[in-house]
Image (cartoon, rainbow, N blue to C red):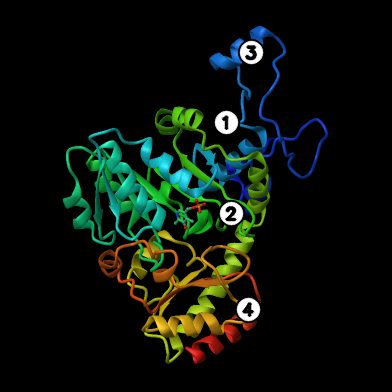
Amino acid sequence: MAENPQDWQTETKLVRGGMVRSPYGEISEALYLTQSFAYESAGAADRRFSGEEPGFIYQRFGNPTTQMFEDRLALLEGAEVCRATASGMAAVHVALQGLVRAGDHIVAGRALFGSCRWILSDWMPRFGVEVTYVDATDLEAWKNAVRPNTKCFLVESPANPLLEVTAIGAVAEIAHAAGAKLVVDNVFATPVFQKPLALGADIVVYSATKHIDGQGRVLGGAILGAEALMTESYKDILRHTGPALSPFNAWVLLKGLETLELRVTRQSENAAKIADVIGAHAKTKRVLYPGRPDHPQAAIIANQMSGGGNVVAFDLGDRAAAWRFLDALAIVDISNNLGDAKSMATHPCTTTHRSMPEAERLEIGLTEGWVRMSVGLEGSGDLIRDVSRALDAA
Ligand SMILES: *Cc1c(COP(=O)(O)O)cnc(C)c1O
């Protein structure tokens, strides 16, 4: 009986999706470290280049190991096509650049990963693309920002670092009414807990560096969407500008996908417990976690996310208290990555968001007391002890 992989459960898609075995019958996916490919004849090369005959040509265009990673992630996401990139930022950059021309306009949620903000505020204007930032939770603000030349909306939900959540379906409707495409950066939610394409988004981007690797090893990224849009907007830019993912990194990420559901489910359980411990501590002014009923967008979260994810943000009042907390941690590392098996915490104002002008930081509510914690796979008892002791010290 032939199985249809699209009907598989998530866990099966992650372990077996996209696998193409070589004649050796390997169990672990093969790593094809090859830049180029040989053709059987001059005619075969001609047909390969013309697109008449399928097959690989050059690593910048595609590679069998990279394609296994792309096909597995596409299957998980429910996307027709996935294209891998060398990093999450390459994915965000290409995803935006492919949708706009000089004279066009982008609307973006104002709480964004720092490098995404640089692309929008510093890079896009060099090519005559205008950008408007909005409070991503305010649907009227999205509507009011639309101009005749608006081609693209960008949302990160939950957003970094304060986990603000946007109603993806409602924003997609506003984008489509304006003739624009909605791009969602789905890193914090992970492909396990939120499916932006099913909610109405046109394009989803990932930093695979985060949960998809999840073990702190390689950079990677991905762009996913419907075949027609992926071909029209991204095929040529990916071929000719060179953000290709290394097949070695694709292999690491392919193996990362096998355990993704297990890891993010356990991380999310740990994060929920830790968010409650933090929320109940006298030193905490405020805790934000998408799995808690006191999250400002709890109703939207219930509609569009199937898990809270592994990031918790909390306000300890001022920088000195936040730093005392970080310096008192004995298990959790002070580090700015997220989604890793190892728990880590960071002070966004002096690390990830230090280049954001203070006025803009205050607009998104990011004051000096906030700490962002990425909860890992350690035992929850050990993490709770470490975090409780550090909160006492704060
Ligand atoms: C890390 C991150 C990126 C960038 O990914 P890299 O792989 O580091 O280039 C983009 N968006 C979000 C939300 C991220 O957390």
**Which residue matches tag 1?**
60
Q: Between tags 3 and 2, which lies in front? A: 3
Residue 104 drawn above or below residue 374: above
State how far apart marks 3 and 4 are (Cα): 56 Å
Residue at x-position 34% and y-position 68%: 299
Q: Amino acid at mark 2?
A: Ile
The label nearer to you, 3 versus 4, is 4
Query: Which comes sooner in the sequence, label 3 or label 4?
Result: 3
Q: Residue at x 63, y 32 (%)?
A: 63
Picture residue at 50% right of the left edge, 83% below the top: 325
Q: Is residue 257 above or below residue 349?
A: above
Contact (Cβ within 8 Å) of mark 1 with mark 3: no
Q: Identity of the amino acid at label 4? A: Ile
User: Residue 88: x percent and y percent?
Assistant: 49, 49
Tell me the residue that label 2 is attached to. Answer: 212
C-alpha separation, residue under disc 4 versus residue under disc 1: 41 Å
Relative side of 238 to 212, left or right = left
